[in-house]
Structures are given as C-alpha cells and as structure tokens.
Image (cartoon, rainbow, N blue to C red):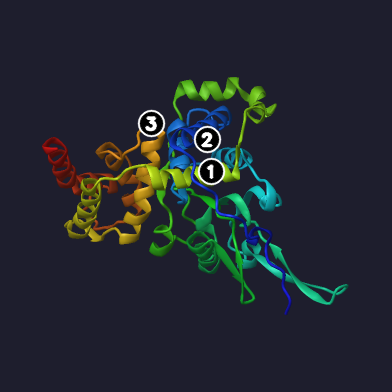
Amino acid sequence: MNASVAPSASVSAPVPALDLPAAREVVERLQTRLRMSVRGRDDVIELVLIALLADGHVLLEDYPGSGKTTLAKSLGESIMASGTHAKIVPFRRVQFTPDLLPSDITGTTIFDPNTNNFFFRPGPVFAYVVLADEINRTSPKVQAAMLEAMAEKQTTVDNDTHALDELFFVIATQNPLDLAGTFPLPSPQLDRFLFKIRMEHIDRKSELDVLNSIRERRSGAAHELPGVARDEVIGARRAVEDQIYVSEAIREALVDAAAATREHPHVLQGVSTRSLVMMLPALQARALLRGRDFVSGEDLEALAPLVFGHRLELTPAAESEEAVVADCLGSAMEKLARASLSR
C-alpha cells in the first residue's frame, strides 16, 4: 500500500530558542488577543498559555456557554504558519459523541481509482490547536486514539504512523454536571492532561463587559492585533526550558509533595512521576509570565492543585482534592522556605 504522509510530517530545521525578553513579548501578544476575544477569563487564559509553553494539554471542566470554544479558536487563529507548515490548519473543533470512530479524528486511508494508489486524508488532530469538546461522551476506543496523539504527537492509521506538528495542543472539555451517557476518562488519559481547570461563572462586571462588547468582538477586532508565528511559540518553549532556572530546593519540594500524596491517609492513588516531569516546564512557564528567570515557591503553590488534583484517587472520607493537595504541600513548602532563608 502506498499511503502518503500527513502534511505536518515535513522535515524542517530545529527552531532555535528565543531570548527571554522575546519569549515574554510572544506571550504578551497572545494574551492581548485572547483577552480581547474572551472577557473575564484572565486567570484561565494565563493557565492555557502556561500549558502551551510547557507543551502540555488542558482539560476544562466547564458549563455550556462559558467561552471555551471562543478561547480555543482565538488561540488557534492567533498562531500563523509559514514555510513547510503553511498547510496546517490553525484550529479544529471535534464534537465527541458516542458514535464517533477513531478515524473521524485521526484521519483515514482512501483509495484513488485514478492513480490506483492509496492516500492518507488527515483528520482534525492535524492542527495547531484542537478543541476536544465533551471528550467524555465518546467511547474508550476513540479516547485511546486521542491518547496516542496527545502522548506521542503521532497517529497510527492502517499500520502507518503519521507525525503531528510539534506545536500540537489539545484543549478538552467536559460538563461537570451532565453524567448521562458519558464514558469517564480513565486514569492514564487524565494523566496526559497537564492541568484540569474548573471554570466558574464570570463575575457581574465581566458579564456586563461581555454584553457591551458583542459588536466589537463580532467585527473581529482581535484579528487586527498582531498574532504570533508558529516558530515563535516553539522558540518561546525552548527559552522556557533552557533559560528559566529551577533550583534543587524546588525539585526536592516537588518530589516531597508528590511523596506526601502517596502516603496521605485519604489518598488511594497518589500522583505519578510523569506528572512531576510535566510540571517542571509549567513552573518555568509561569515564572516567565510573571517576569522572572527563576522558579519560586509561589509557582509551585499556585500550580500544584491544578496538576495534582485530577490525578488523585481519594477515599470517601476525603474533604476535597484541594484540601488534600494543600495538606500534602504543607511540609514541602515549609522545608523550601527554610532552605530559602538559609541561603
């Protein structure tokens, strides 16, 4: 069988790291465009950008009409392709349903009678930003196909492997209240998401701002603002990894907090080592957004609930994920503070 590769599989030269001021400027451009399109969600926008820079994925637990599609679409449309990546779609939305098939998201091999050859037609995962809407409404088989794409940045169709773009970023959603006809995400799938973010209703002032800015947003005012190039985002990722300092004390605090989750009396299953590996670049990305070239204890305290919470399996006696994470962080943060004072 002669199947062509996906458009994102083109080989290109590695993207060099930006310097930190240039990386910050890239993030600021993205923030400005997203805040123009999505009002009252500055905290969520920051977390999504942290995940993007950390090369992670995000699970949003939200209510219908909370702006998730607008957020994901605005992010995708803010990133411009060039060169060998020019054919990649910036944003795709997949509505997950019980009758969805793996090939509906990964793509399929098609026979062309004119050339007597098979060719690969890419699915919606071949994009920079993919919104996986109501991901818990599809079957485990489709969830497994998404798992491979998220974990390996590739898909396998008819024994042929097709590479996704290096930038590939998933924003998945699930409704916290609607449980009928759903397939709860298994632990391995949840572990692939860097953050699980619960989106609450926005405040009164922000809701009024949404109503007052309808015409401005519908006219595409955000599109008049400068976007970012795909390579700039990759370069900012490399800057975060290479140029934001992580002290040994921070690494020890992270490991100690994880160990505490595994020993806590109200935890049946603690966090994985993989979650710690994924969390390091997230801590570095948050430091960049806060204008620092080093990770602080504040970054660890802010992100731990979002990274650890959905990975814990709690006993019925547990108060909440947040309370357990705070309890597990306590000793590690104390030790970190003492180490900071002794320097």
Vertical comparison of 209 with 120: above or below = above
- What's the residue type where badge 1 is placed? Val
Q: Residue at 14% of width from left, 44% of height from top?
A: 335
Horizontal side of 199 relative to 306 (left or right) equals right
Vertical comparison of 112 with 204: above or below = below
- Give yes or no for contact between labels 2 and 3 (Cβ–Cβ under 8 Å): no
- What's the residue type where badge 3 is placed? Gly
How many other residues sit within 10 Å of disc 3, few (<14), some (14-19) or many (≥20)? few
Q: CA distance from mark 2 to mark 1?
A: 7 Å
How many other residues sit within 10 Å of disc 2, few (<14), some (14-19) or many (≥20)? many
Return the residue at label 2.
Answer: 26
Q: Secondary structure at mark 2?
A: helix
Q: CA distance from mark 2 to mark 3?
A: 13 Å
Q: CA distance from mark 3 to mark 1?
A: 17 Å
Instruction: Depth check: give the residue in front, 18 or 173.
Output: 18
Question: Which x, y percent locates residue 61?
Answer: 45, 46
- What's the residue type where badge 2 is placed? Val
Q: Secondary structure at mark 3?
A: loop
Return the residue at label 1.
Answer: 233
- Give yes or no for contact between labels 2 and 1 (Cβ–Cβ under 8 Å): yes
Horizontal side of 305 relative to 256 (left or right) equals right
Q: Can residue 242 be seen here?
A: yes
Question: Which x, y percent locates residue 265?
Answer: 16, 57
- In the rendered structure, which disc, 3 or 1, sits on the residue that comes first in sequence? 1
- In the rendered structure, which disc, 2 or 1, sits on the residue that comes first in sequence? 2
Question: Which x, y percent locates residue 74?
Answer: 60, 38
Looking at the figure, which quarter contains the C terminus? top left
Task: Report the disc number at residue 291.
Answer: 3
